[in-house]
Amino acid sequence: MVIYSCSKDSSSIEEIPSNDIGPQYVLENDSIVEFLQTHFYNYKDFENLSSNNTVELLIDTISGDNNDKISLFDQVSILSIDIEDDNNEMISHNMYYIINREGNGDSPTVADSVFVAYKGMTLGNTTFDNRKNPTWLDNTTTVRGFKEFTALLKRGDISTNNDGTYLLSNYGIGMTIMPSALGYYNNSTISIPAYSPLIFQINLTTYNSTDHDHDGINSIDEDLNGDHIFSNDDTDEDNLPNYRDADDDGDGVLTIDEYDADGDGVVDDTDGDGIPDYLDNDNE
């Protein structure tokens, strides 16, 4: 997926020198808060939605005939997400969100494959992508704020019609506004300037749990440090992260053959050193 469809990997990216994360976040958060206080969205259109219907997100300024509208600021919830700066310090970033319909299933993880329709905008109300029909996205390759928000939604129901088509209903719908460190940060495209806070409306119709390397361990469980970043978990330091590595400890024995070799439902640790065999290249 190219950058304007919320993926973080694309040859169309132009990177400029990186600003310090802390001061940049303070600057952007002030802009986001001001935006939230002075803008509203078409919340009335989201009231009393039918089970298989949605509404496209529209945002406008509170002024003139719209002076009586409820601001985004008075409707959002906040999720705090830590981002590591160049000094290895964690800087908390506020991601603001509204859930219009929670959904009635369970939620994906930040590692799963999600079937979503979505709209992406900048604070300047420029739409850089609008996928009205659901498409599959791999959460491990989307920008941080996108995958963190999909994990707050729940999937819906899928039923098959007599003509072979399917009906999606009761799925999660919501919007999120995030600082650029949860988006593309110092990367830019024609429609997304560097250091742009982003707005996403996301409809989560369903998802699939993922095991990217087919080693018997779901990808979410290969995020060993729990930071929701999958590229920095590389036990054998072979430049292949664990969730993409069929032999996590590099001992020549596949992870799937070391994880629970005796099939008792307990992760094997042959030498009792507290390190599971599949992560221990010396387990005798």
Image (cartoon, rainbow, N blue to C red):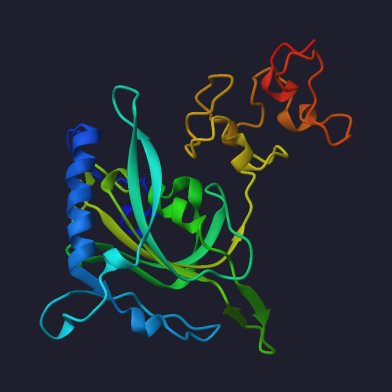
> Which residue: 57% across, 77% down?
170
Q: Can residue 194 be seen in this view?
A: no
Quarter of the image where one finds residue 55 = bottom left
| Nearer to the camera, 127 or 77 | 77
Q: How many labels does the image show?
A: 0
Residue at left offset 78%, top offset 20%: 269
Residue 82 against residue 55 in the figure, above or below: above
Image quadrant holding the C terminus, namely top right
Quarter location, residue 68: bottom left
Q: Quadrant of residue 73?
A: bottom left
Q: Name, please, the residue furthest toward the bottom.
A: 162
Picture coordinates of residue 174 (x, y %)?
Answer: 43, 67
Residue at x 23% of width, y 41% of height? 25
Q: In this view, does 105 lie above or below 84?
A: below
Q: Where's the N terminus, which quadrant?
A: bottom left
The x, y position of residue 89, in whole percent, is: 34, 26
- Where 141 falls versus 162 (above or below)? above
Q: Depth check: 162 or 278 in front?
A: 278
> Which of 23/57 is in front?
23
Residue 59 in view, yes or no: yes
**x%, y% of residue 110?**
52, 48
Q: In the displayed structure, would residue 187 be above or below residue 253? A: below
User: On the picture, is 165 further left or further right than 174?
Assistant: right
**Residue 260 image offset from top left, x and y in percent:** 81, 31
Is 162 displayed left or right of 226 in the figure? right
